[in-house]
Image (spheres, grey):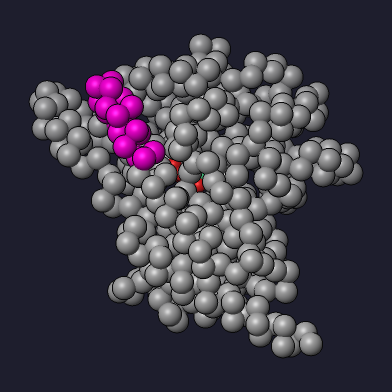
């Protein structure tokens, strides 16, 4: 299970190994997987696309391609990103093998051992893994329901003795926190970075998965704001929409950053699979993405509504969360004396798993939260899973009262 590789290497590896063992068992109710459910993948559409490819394109699927990416896919991506308001003409696109590769490339390009990277707290565990593997010193900044804590960010930048190489953020439908930066918070963040020379690495893996069309404008990427004083590298992924098996991601950056990134990528894997790039391009070029996204949005919104409803019905009043407006995750807050890892140890024996809070803390400590993903589990299991989880949490709260009194 890729998502847990960082934790496996951390001091809490025993818990996570246990999770992995349990997660491979049968009849498990898993709120853990941050990926689409297998039943949601566009299997039919991809069958049709491949079967109707001309023979020469089928052959090209098996071939190497340019390191920067399959040119027709770059062209299709340009239109897709232009619709998001992104400055595609003044920047360059690099196709990557998943957006985690884009994060790895940027890290290799800018970070030497001991260099500082700023992240949110909590932050996407895959990115933390990349930064740790590069030997970076991670300084994390708390987030609230509207985005990164601006005061804390300012004071962190002022007190550090060296300039951080970049700030890594996930402003839209955050993993794991499920939150959405407000437009004001995005602007404030850009103001803080202006003139500091700190690069902004904007990870936008989930922005197409909003639940309400009226809120689509809130997903506007910071790179589209036209702020020239901040160097922004924008990354995106098809993993949450077409499927992680595609391993299709991309980065949009200035030409200078692109050129070095292309060299780094060449040394990593020469090129992203032509097979997947050709299929992905046909999906975009044949205008199949829009209707498929509409289907996904209604599916995920239904799953979120179910999870929200059952959490409201069964969770004790001490448990709080923000209802997400898109994406895959609900981030439950436990009372301060209850640890998510302890809850996990209980629920796993009853066949329910989730991802513990400290997995997403760069220091692997803060454990008063737990991440529930509604994207991957069968809808009919949500209620049973919530009942088991809430009973366990209620018992832990009762026991803690006894211990405290
Ligand atoms: C915030 C975030 N960024 C990036 C990724 C990585 O996606 P990819 O499969 O494109 O490497 C994920 C996957 O979980 C994610 O949650």
Say which of 15 and 390 sits in front. Answer: 390
Q: In x, y percent, where is residue 250?
A: 46, 31
Left or right side of 154 for 133 = left
Which secondary structure type mostly characterizes the magenta part of the structure?
Answer: helix
Which segment is the magenta one?
280-298
Left or right side of 70 for 49 = left
Residue at the outermost front position: 313
Left or right side of 239 for 174 = right
Say which of 155 and 378 sits in front. Answer: 378
At 30% from the left and 74% from the top, the residue drawn is 26
Q: Is residue 16 visible?
A: no
How many marks the image carries: the answer is 0
Magenta region includes residue 249: no
Quadrant, the C terminus: bottom right
At 65% from the left and 53% from the top, the residue drawn is 122
Quadrant, the N terminus: bottom left
Q: In x, y percent, where is residue 378?
A: 32, 59
Q: Is residue 354 above or below residue 285?
A: below
Q: In x, y percent, where is residue 4?
A: 50, 62
Say which of 200 and 394 sits in front. Answer: 394
At 22% from the left and 32% from the top, the residue drawn is 61
At 78% from the left and 26% from the top, the residue drawn is 191
Q: Quadrant of residue 60?
A: top left
Q: Quadrant of residue 269?
A: top left
Q: Is residue 80 visible?
A: yes
Q: In x, y percent, where is residue 27?
A: 31, 73
């Amino acid at each position: 299970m890729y998502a847990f590789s960082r934790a496996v290497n951390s001091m809490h590896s025993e818990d996570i190994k246990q999770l992995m063992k349990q997660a491979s068992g049968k009849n498990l109710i898993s709120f853990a997987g941050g990926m689409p459910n297998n039943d949601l993948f566009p299997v039919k559409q991809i069958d049709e696309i491949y079967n109707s490819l001309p023979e020469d394109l089928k052959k090209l699927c098996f071939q190497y391609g340019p390191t920067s990416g399959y040119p027709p896919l770059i062209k299709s991506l340009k239109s897709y990103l232009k619709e998001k308001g992104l400055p595609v003409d003044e920047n360059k696109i690099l196709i990557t093998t998943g957006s985690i590769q884009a994060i790895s490339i940027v890290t290799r390009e800018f970070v030497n051992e001991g260099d500082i990277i700023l992240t949110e707290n909590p932050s996407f565990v895959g990115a933390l893994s990349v930064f740790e593997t590069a030997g970076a010193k991670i300084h994390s900044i708390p987030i609230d329901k509207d985005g990164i804590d601006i005061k804390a960010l300012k004071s962190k930048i002022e007190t550090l003795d060296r300039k951080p190489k970049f700030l890594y953020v996930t402003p839209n439908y955050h993993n794991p926190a499920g939150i959405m930066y407000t437009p004001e918070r995005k602007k404030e963040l850009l103001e803080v970075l202006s003139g500091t020379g700190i690069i902004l690495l904007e990870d936008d893996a989930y922005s197409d998965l909003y639940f309400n069309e009226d809120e689509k404008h809130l997903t506007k990427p910071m790179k589209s704001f036209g702020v020239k004083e901040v160097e922004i590298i924008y990354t995106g992924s098809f993993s949450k929409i077409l499927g992680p098996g595609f391993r299709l991601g991309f980065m949009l950056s200035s030409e200078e950053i692109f050129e070095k990134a292309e060299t780094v990528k060449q040394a990593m894997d020469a090129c992203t699979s032509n097979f997947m790039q050709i299929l992905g391009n046909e999906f975009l070029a044949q205008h199949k993405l829009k209707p498929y996204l509409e289907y996904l949005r209604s599916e995920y919104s239904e799953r979120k509504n179910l999870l929200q409803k059952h959490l409201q019905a069964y969770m004790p009043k001490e448990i709080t969360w923000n209802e997400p407006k898109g994406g895959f995750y609900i981030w439950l807050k436990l009372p301060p004396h209850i640890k998510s890892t302890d809850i996990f140890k209980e629920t796993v024996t009853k066949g329910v798993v989730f991802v513990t809070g400290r997995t997403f803390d760069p220091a692997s400590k803060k454990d008063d939260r737990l991440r529930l993903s509604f994207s991957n589990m069968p809808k009919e299991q949500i209620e049973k899973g919530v009942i088991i989880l809430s009973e366990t949490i209620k018992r832990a709260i009762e026991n803690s009262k006894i211990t405290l009194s």
